[in-house]
Amino acid sequence: MVERRRILQATAAIGAAAVLSQQGGWAWAAKQGRAGTLNPKRIRKYATPLTVPQVLSPARDEARGPAHYRIGVRQFRQQILPKGMPRTTVWGYGDVSKAGAFRSPSGTIEATVDRPVRVTWVNELVDAAGDFRPHLLAVDPTLHWANPPGGTAGRDTRPAFTATPGSYRGPVPIVTHLHGGRSLEDSCGYPEAWYLPKARNIPGGHATVGTFYDEFGAEFARRHGVAWQPGSATFHYGNDQRAATLWYHDHALGMTRVNVYAGLSGFYLLRGGDADLPPGVLPGPAPRPGDRPGTRYYEIPLMVQDRSFNKDGSLFYPDSRAFTDSAGPYIPDGPFPPIWNPAFLADTMTVNGSTWPVLEVEPRRYRLRLLNGCNSRVLIMKIVTDPLAHRPAPPALPLWQIGNDGGFLPEPVSQRQLLLGPAERADVIVDFTGLREGTELYLINEGPDKLCGDDFDPSHPATTGQIMKFTVGRLTGKDRSVPPEELDLPRTRPLGRADKTRRLALDEQLGNDHSVKMMLCTIDEHGQAVPKHWHDPITEQPALHATEVWELHNWSAHVHPVHLHVVQFEVLGRGKDGHQPPRAGDRGLKDTVLTFPGEITRVKAVFDLAGRYVWHCHLLEHEDNDMMRPFRVG
């Protein structure tokens, strides 16, 4: 109930902001059956065994030096819906040397602390003839976006139109970001460092790379002696950070929402170092390269995502702003983008690329690495015996949280339910010990099916309120892992004294044309929000090695997960004054934090990598329409 009240506060419309939301069409008003032509109630639940993501093998693994991977992005068909239903065309990452290695979510990269990894990310969104593949989903060309048709002079801009355009159907730009990773600017996945596939039919005049691609490529070549090849970029990850659950996903400017929804994401698990635990202390084993089919795992990554489908199995994603509201008039006759929607909450839950899967577990402890991979949906998860029980449902087992975005917590925390915003991770232990064979348990979601309003009901119990099922089987061997309540977790080294405090705001801005936009803002000396667009001059410029406190004032009507690239930060406080203690799951280090309306969230970080990076809201629809800002270190 505590977390439910928290989310109620986080999504309540407050004061004038609520009025702005209504005028801008921000109030979520999706109707039953509106999200796609396939009714989610007609999809069989718990008919598909959970897929455990395979671990990718490096193309070259030298005893001294980085492990090298060549990972492509391709289009393929996948059985996301239960067998007997149509397959779904998606995109995913995979080993370029193995045609069958592509899946969404994609294979896991296993890395070791202080052992570098080098990945060549290849844009292979081409067909068998070598022609580019257009996007699976509707791309709004009126945003401030990558804009390849703009050519070198007009790329990475907001184009002007004399008539309302349709969806962009040209070659697709990508650039991959290691979320939570420490990497220099040439390897961070900067939104304006995108690149098109090496296709034979790129239209004349199109820009084939983003504004910073050539600069970062030259920088990388100077640093590592490796030149980027057309249609690809090679990134270097030093892995000089704590063991943690990281993930990778696309980050192209103004297209992240559709590229990730199409399938571009995967886990990156960093192990070892002083801030890890010895083998055997936690449940294991985890997947390893070359495992035989049927290998039993007691550590499993779980990427939870919401998706909607059409009757032919294809992904549904809105192709018109009319899905959310009838705001209009659309660009150029009015202020509203014709295709982009302020948010999208789909009507079907998936885990590791399957709808409502089932996992047979033994009566022993399991380590689950949970990631909220949804575009806009906040999850409140718990384990129950009855998936249709009245909400809030009583939990059947605690979720012992031992880690978050930045690695282990200071101590294990027994959670009745787990609150995760988009991009947040939780490392948890679930203890099935002593349960009888045949026992059925369910991972459910009590988060909202909307973004804002004066109140909300939990997700629909028959659809988005369910996530996956656990069925208890027989024990095959002794569990030698340590009970979670007895774990002694590695200590987190606290960050030093702050050199500077920055006051920043998240706000809804009402334009003279009655349009509403979510913005990141600075706060001036009078305490007023000064909205900043993506293209405005950089205002956040920490000195190299500076320790700063960022005060995030949420003056909007929404909860926003705020992500800073290349740093792990401490959450210092929350609340009306920013000095209430952080939630137990927010202790230690994080890279993404939920900010609640009417509150100040204070975080502290050390900015020790020089270069140009970004901070943004991780509601993907928001970041794609200007709720993202560059910052420069040094």
Image (tube, grey):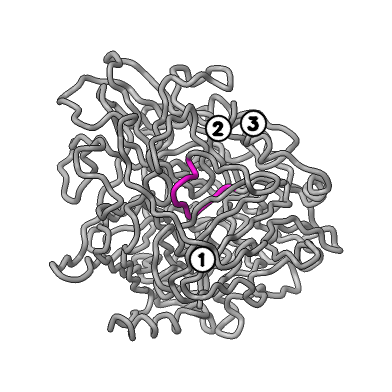
Q: Quadrant of the N terminus?
A: top right
Foreground pick, 315 / 104: 104
- Residue type at mark 1? Thr
Task: Decide whether residue 150 is among the magenta residues.
Answer: no
The answer to the question of whether label 3 and label 1 lie on touching residues, with beta carbons closer than 8 A, is no
Displayed quadrant of residue 512: bottom right
Q: Residue at x 36, y 41 (%)?
A: 369
Residue type at tag 2: Asn
Which percent across, then down, holds residue 514?
84, 58
User: Measured along the vertical axis of the image, is residue 21 above or below residue 61?
Assistant: above
Q: Which residue is mark 2?
A: 39
Kindly identify the amino acid type of the residue bearing the numbered disc 3.
Arg
Badge 1: few (under 14), some or many (20 or more) residues near its Cα, within 10 Å? many
- Label 3 sits on residue: 5
Q: Please tell me whether mark 2 sits on a helix, a strand or a loop.
A: loop
C-alpha span from label 2 to label 3 = 30 Å
Q: Name the residue that disc number 1 marks.
A: 547
> Which circle, 2 or 3, is nearer the viewer?
3
Q: Answer with left or right where residue 310 lies relative to residue 269.
A: right
Q: Position of residue 174 (x, y in %)?
A: 45, 67
406 relative to 120, above or below = above
Residue 162 pos. (x, y %): 76, 74
Numbered range of the magenta stretch = 585-594
Q: Earlier in the sequence, mark 3 or mark 1?
A: 3
State how far apart marks 3 and 1 are (Cα): 33 Å
- Asked whether, in this view, residue 420 is left or right of residue 197, the answer is right
